[in-house]
Image (cartoon, rainbow, N blue to C red):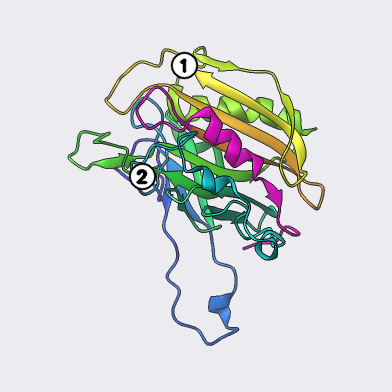
């Protein structure tokens, strides 16, 4: 049975469009929570992953150092506001979390779900997160099915997700980091995914947890968008004591790839943003 949310030009990709919402009087139903929009990633090797943002500016240590300056105290007191001058805040009300990304990144709504399906079973979601931010949405384009319909492949993706069933932050990171790399870049081969040991880490705001870095080496270039990638996952607890994770993944070994220094700068801004609630 075909998945009703399946886009025919993207094998392994899901897309759940937002519902139509007619104008409402203040306080009406239009102001209440909406259903999730789903943007799921392209299966690895055939059409790669979700990624994106706005410009081709190379990010990393060459960025303007002025962005390292903290925003004024009045704004810094609000966790939903960016903590790095000139950056954008990415807030996930569902998990009570926030972090910042550089201005070139595209911040999507908290109700957007981004993830990857199994290439062999497109109804099976391998992994995903909500309230994502994308870097370089049109980094690469491909006609995955050869039907003439071209899909854009993004270069990097970051967001947060719940981790129900995990025992501790380190376990979250150990399980999720290689899963992101496999789901986005190496399917069906898990042997090319390598995972580092967990590293204890505390963000600038005092959030404590552990992160794990995973990467692939030697992914076959089955198409001009395919290739190696990496993921960094930081496991921690929100204000309710629930285990959650911050997840970055992106392509490696290509011009403009997000470098390790920038990944860690974004990770350093992870913070709690009030009690979890449905957006």
The reply, left or right, for residue 172 in relation to residue 85 is right
Q: Name the residue under label 2.
A: 137
Alpha carbon of mark 2 to alpha carbon of mark 1: how far?
26 Å
Residue furthest out toward the left: 148
Assign a secondary structure to mark 2: loop
Q: In this view, does 230 lie above or below 112?
A: above
Q: Quadrant of residue 42?
A: top left
Q: Mark 1 points at which residue?
A: 189
- Mark 2 vs mark 1: give the one in front: 2
Q: Front-most of 147 and 89?
A: 89
Q: In this view, does 4 lie above or below 117?
A: below
The answer to whether residue 159 shows anywhere in this view is yes
Q: In which quarter of the image is the C terminus?
A: bottom right
Q: How crowded is mark 2: few (under 14 residues within 10 Å), some or many (20 or more)?
A: many
Magenta residues, start to end: 250-279
Where's residue 33, x and y in %?
Answer: 59, 68
N-terminal of the two: label 2 or label 1?
2
> Which residue is drawn at the image coordinates 63% and 33% (left, top)?
233
Badges 2 and 1: C-beta atoms under 8 Å apart? no
Q: Is residue 88 magenta?
A: no
The reply, left or right, for residue 185 in relation to residue 208 is left
> Which residue is drawn at the image coordinates 76% and 43% (left, top)?
207
Q: In which quarter of the image is the N terminus?
A: top left
Assign a secondary structure to mark 1: loop
Q: Does the magenta stretch include residue 267?
A: yes
The reply, left or right, for residue 248 in relation to residue 196 is left
């Amino acid at each position: 049975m075909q998945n009703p949310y399946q886009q025919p030009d993207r094998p392994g990709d899901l897309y759940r469009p937002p519902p139509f919402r007619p104008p409402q009087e203040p306080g009406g139903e239009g102001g209440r929570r909406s259903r999730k929009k789903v943007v799921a990633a392209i299966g690895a090797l055939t059409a790669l992953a979700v990624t994106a943002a706005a410009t081709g500016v190379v990010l990393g240590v060459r960025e303007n150092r002025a962005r390292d300056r903290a925003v004024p105290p009045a704004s810094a007191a609000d966790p939903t506001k960016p903590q790095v001058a000139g950056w954008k805040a990415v807030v996930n009300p569902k998990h009570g979390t926030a972090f910042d990304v550089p201005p070139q990144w595209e911040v999507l709504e908290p109700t957007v779900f981004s993830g990857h399906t199994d290439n062999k079973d497109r109804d099976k979601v391998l992994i995903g997160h909500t309230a994502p931010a994308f870097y370089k949405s049109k980094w690469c384009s491909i006609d995955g099915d050869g039907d003439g319909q071209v899909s854009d492949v993004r270069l990097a993706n970051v967001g947060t997700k719940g981790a129900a069933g995990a025992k501790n932050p380190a376990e979250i990171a150990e399980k999720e980091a290689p899963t992101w790399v496999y789901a986005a870049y190496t399917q069906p081969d898990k042997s090319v995914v390598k995972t580092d040991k967990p590293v204890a880490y505390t963000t600038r705001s005092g959030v404590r947890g552990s992160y794990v870095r995973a990467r692939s080496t030697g992914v076959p270039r089955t198409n001009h968008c395919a290739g190696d990638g990496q993921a960094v996952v930081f496991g921690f607890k929100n204000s309710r004591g629930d285990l959650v994770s911050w997840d970055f993944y992106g392509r490696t070994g290509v011009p403009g790839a997000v470098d390790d220094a920038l990944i860690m700068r974004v990770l350093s801004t992870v913070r709690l943003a009030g009690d979890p609630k449905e957006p």
